[in-house]
Image: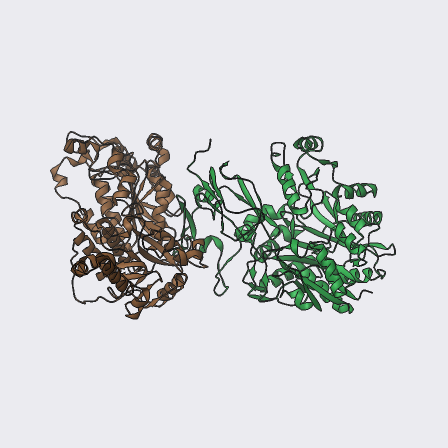
Amino acid sequence: MLSKVLVANRGEIAARIIRTCAELGIATVAVHSEPDKNALHVRLADEAIALAGDRAGETYLNQQALIEACRASGADAIHPGYGFLAENATFAALVEENGLIFIGPSSAAIGQLGDKVRARALAIAAGVPVVPGSKCRVNTMQDVLGFGADHGWPVAIKAVHGGGGRGMRVVHSDDDVGGLLESAKAEAKGAFGNDEMYLERYLDRARHVEVQIFADRFGNTVWLGDRDCSVQRLHQKLIEEAPAPDLSDELRRQMGEASVRLARQVSYVGAGTVEYLVHDGEFFFLEVNTRIQVEHPVTEMVLGVDLVREQLLVAGGAKIAWQSGAAPRGHAIECRVNAEDPSKGFHPKPGRIELLQLPWRPGIRFDFGYESGDTVPPFYDSLVGKVIAWGPSRELALTRLAEALKAMVITGVPTTIPVVCQALKHGEMRAGPVHTRWLEAHLDDLVTAIPMRDNKDDKVVSAKPKYVPTEVWIGNRRYLIPPAPPRMDGQPAGRRSSSAAVQGRRAELGQSGGKVVSPIHGVVLDIAVHVGQKVSEGERLLTVEAMKMENIVSAPCAGVVDDVLVAVKSSVAADQHLITINPSVPVA
Amino acid sequence: MNSAIEISKTARIDSASVQERIELIAEMRSKTFDDARPQATSKQHGLGKLTARERIGYLVDEGSFTEFGGLVAPGQAQAGSQNSPAPADGLVTGTAWVDGRPVVVASFDFTVMGGSNGVINTRKLERCRERALNDRSPLIILQDGGGHRVQEGLDSRHFASGAIGFQQMCDLSGLVPVVTAILGPGFAAPTNIAALCDFVVMVRGLSTMGIAGPAIVEAATGEKLTKEQIGGADVQTSNGLADLATDTEHEALDALRVYLSYLPSHAQAAPLHMPGPYQVAPIAKRVNNLVPTDSRHAYDVRDVIESIADLDSICEIKPMHARNIVTSLVRIGGRPVGVVANQPMFLGGAMDSPACEKAAHFIALCDAYGIALLFLVDVPGFLAGAGAESTQLGRRSGRLLYELGIATVPRFTVVLRKGYGGGYFAMGGGRSFGADLCVAWPTAEICAMPIEGAIEVAYRRDIDASADPSARRAELLAAFRRNVSPLSAADGFGIDDVIEPAATRDVLLSALSRVQLRRPPRVPGKLRSISPI
C-alpha cells in the first residue's frame, strides 16, 4: 500500500487523484507552477510544492524538480495523471531509478508502446488488426506519394512519438502533398522534440472506439469495456460515451481480447487504453495510451469501477478483482468543458472563472479542476472540467447531459458547452454513433445555431441570424451595423447574405493593413519569415502556441516584411503587434 | 402617347380576361427588368457598373424592395423629337428595408437616356420624397447620369413650372436622413441634388461631380481638363463636396448603410443601439501616452478616438477634406456619438474655414438626429493670415460657434492638450456652450493665446525697456507658464475635473448614461436664428 503520492499534474485529473487518495488514506503532495499556486489541486492536497516558473516545460515537465519534490516530501510514488509526463518513458525510468513507484506501466512498456512504429509491430505480432500502413518511417514526399499510390488516399502522416493529433496531417490526394510533411515534422519537433514520422491509410468516416485495459503485477490482464470517442475536433475528443453504441458483442469481445493480447506482449501493468478505428464492422489498431484517459469516467459509470482507485491499489501491490468483459449497466456520456470560444474558431480563452455553478442531480457527475473565482492560466490546456451523465439508456444519458449543461452556469470565460449542447440536440448524434469527421463537418452549423446571450443578465435574447450586428468592410476598415427591431409584417429584419468582401475580410480579422497582431495570448513557437522577405497573401508568418494549440498567423496581404517585433519563445499578448508587412512594395 | 408599345398594350388589355390581364401586366412589368434588357444590361456592365436594379438589390434587405411607378412610360417628347422606350422612365423607385429599417429608394438608370430627368421620372422622385416625408423614412438616391432630358426639356410649356424637388429636399433636411451615392457621371443636376443630401459617397474611377463638366468648363474658361481632374472622387472628397470615396460600387452602397446605421430613421426616433459586449481597440492600452506633453510634437488624434470608442464603431465623415479637423460618427457603449477632434497632424490642428465648415455641418447633422457630441480639443486657435482672411474665416468660424449655440444635444468636451483662444470656445471648451461634461487630460494647456506670442504682443514695451530683455522675456514666460496647467484650469472650476486618459471612456459612458437626450430651446418662441453664413 502506498503511503504518500506526489501528483505530477494539475487541473481536474490532479483533483480527481488527490480525492481518491484521500479515500484510501494515502497522503498527497501537489506540485504547482507559479500561476497555479492557489489552484484547486493545491488546495485539496495535504502538501504542496512550488515549481519555479509558469510554462509547462519549467514546471510540470521538469523531471528533476519532480524527483526532488518527491525526496523533499517523502512521497513514495508519483501519479502522472494524463498529458505532461504520463507517457514519458525517460521519466518513468528516472522514477524507477530513484526507487520510487511510477503509477503506470514500466518504463520499458511505455517505451515500446509509445513508439508508434514499434507499437504497430507489436500489434501485428499479437494478431491485432492494423490499418494498412507503412512499416517504416517516412522521410520524403516521395514516400508519401508512393504510399498513396499503393494503398490509396487519403493518407495520414503521423508523428512516431506523437499523440492527440499533434504532428498529424491528412493528405487527401497527390495534389495535396505540398508542405504537409514539413509542417507535420515541424509541429512534431516542437511538441515532442522528435520529428520522426510514419504513414498509414486514413479511414474516412470511421469511428473511434477504444478499449480500457487493466493489469496487475501478477499477470492478471483484463479488458473493462469500451468507449466511443468519435466526436472530435482536430483530433481532440469533445464527447465520449460508454459502451460504444451499435457494436456486436462478438466485435467487442474480439477487440477486448486483442487488447489484452497486446498488453501481455509488454507485461503491461496498470490502466491503459487501446485505441481503434472501427470501419464497416472491422477494427484497426491505432495506438495505446499508457495512462489513465480523460474520458475514464464513462467506463466507471457503467461498470461501477473506480479506475484511479484501482491504479493506486495495483501500484501498491494489490491484485485486481475484475474480470474481462464485465457487462456494462446502462449508458454514460461525457463532455469536456474547455475554456474556448466556439464562435472564434475555438480559440482558447484563459481567464478568471467568475462563477461556476454545477447542477448536481441524479445520474450526473462533475470532474472539475476549478471552482468559482479560479483562473484558467494561459500556459496549459484549456480543459476546465468534464460533465458525465449516466442513464439506463443512451437516450436518457444524452438528455440528462443536455439538461445538466443547460442548467450549468459558468461565467468569465467562454466555454465549449454551447456547441456541445447543439451537438447533443443533433438528430444524427441522437440516432446513434457518428464518425470521427462528423463534428468538423457540422461545426459551422452547430456554432451558427448557438443562441446569442446578453452578457448583462445572461438571458437568451434571440437566435444568431436575427439579433447580431451585420459586418461591413469598406477599404481596410470594419464596421458593424446594429440589429434592427422586428418588422410589423413579420418579415425577418435585416436579412441579407454577407457580401464576398466580408467573407474575405473575415479571414483577416484582427489584422488591419500590414500590421499583424497576435490572435491570442501565447508563446511564439516559430517564425517563418525574416525582415525584407517577400510574402504572399495568406502565407504563414509565424506560429503562436497557446494552451497546447498552435495558431498559425498568416499574412493579411502580399508585401514585404518590414519588421519582426518578436522572437521565438517570447510570450505575446492577444492583439500584440508581431510583424509589419509593407503592402505597398510590389511582390513579383 | 408615344410609340407602338402603348397602343398594343391597350389593345391587348381591352380584349383580355382577368387572368389574361394579370398575366399581361406581369409581362409588361418583367420587360423593365434587367433580364428583359440584355443589351442595356451588358452595356452598363461594360462600363464597369451595376445596373440600377442590381444596386438596389445589393443595398436593401433581401426581398424587401417594393417598386412603385415601374409601369410608367416617358413623358411626351416635344415637337421634332422622339422618345426612346424608357423602362420605368429611367428611374427605379420604391420602398425597401435596409438593415431592418424602412427606407425609400430611387435609383437612376443610366441606360435609359443617360439617366436624364424627364417629366415622369421627376414626378416619381417627387413621390419618393413625399413618401420619405410622410413615412418618416430615410431617402436614398442612387445617381448615375442625369440632367434635363433634352427630348422633353426644350419646351417652356413644361419647364416654366420649375420643379418642387429642391423645396422637398429642404422639407426633408433634418427630418429624415437623405443620402446619395454618385455612381457615374454626376455633373450638374446630380450635384445639385447631392448638395442637399446629408451624406454623399463617390466611387473612384467611376463617379464625377461638379457644377459643370469638361465641355462646359472648356467653353467657359478655356481650360482643357478631364472629368476626373475636375470632379473625380478623390478631387471632390478632398474639396469636401462629397463625404467619402470608395474603391468599389459595393463599398459605396455599404457606406450608405454604415452611415444610416448611426442615425435614427427620423429626427424624433431613437437611433439603433448596438448590443454588447463592447470592446475597445488594442491601442486603448496606450491611451495614457498617446498625447505628447511637448506641444510641438504631433500625434494622430484618430488614435485617441480609437481608444475611446467601441471597437469597429468609427465612421469618419469627410476624412480627406479639412484634415486638420476629424469628424467621426462612433459608438460608445453601443450609443452613437458624434466626435469633433482637432488633428495636430495637419496645420498643427489650427482651424481654417474648411475645418470650421466641416465641423459646423457635422454638428448640425448630429443635432438634427439627436446624436450627442464629443469634442476632443487640441487647438492652437484659428488660422491667422491674409490667406485665411480671404476665406471669410471670421464668418466661417462664426458659423461653427452658431451651430454649437443652437444645438440641443448633449455635448462633452475633453481637452487633450491645447485649448487656445476662440478655438477653445468653438470646440465647446469650459462653460462656453454648457458642456454636460468638460474634463481635461494631464497634458492640457488652456489659455487665451500661446504664451510666447502673447508676451511679444502685450509685454513688448516692458521687455524692450528692461536692462536685459531676454532675461525679462524668460522671466515673464516662466511666470505665465506657471498659470497654464490642467490643475489651474480645475482650480478656477473652468472644467469639471482633470482625468487620467485611460479613464476617459468610462467617464464618458457614465455621462452618456445620465444626460437628457435633448435640451429644451434656450429662447422659447423664437422662430429661427440666422447663420453667419
Q: How is the image coloured?
A: by chain
Q: Nearer the viewer, residue B308 or A563?
A: A563
Quarter of the rendering containing residue A350: bottom right
Q: Position of residue A329 (x, y in %)?
A: 76, 60
Q: Quadrant of the N terminus of chain B?
A: top left
Residue farthest toward the right in the current orientation of the protein:
A218
Q: Is residue B194 above or below residue B305?
A: above
User: Which chain gets the brown colouring?
Assistant: B
Q: Nearer the viewer, residue A164 or A570?
A: A570
Left or right side of B283 for B52: left
Q: Is residue A195 above or below residue B379?
A: above
Q: Tell me if I can see residue B60 in this picture.
A: yes
Q: Tell me if I can see residue A171 in this picture.
A: no
Q: Position of residue B371 (x, y in %)?
A: 31, 59
How many numbered discs?
Answer: 0
Residue visible at 25% across and 43% down?
A: B239
Q: Is residue B481 above or below residue B108?
A: below
User: Which chain gets the green colouring?
Assistant: A
Q: Position of residue A241 (x, y in %)?
A: 69, 55
Quarter of the rendering containing residue A153: top right
Q: Position of residue A214 (x, y in %)?
A: 80, 55
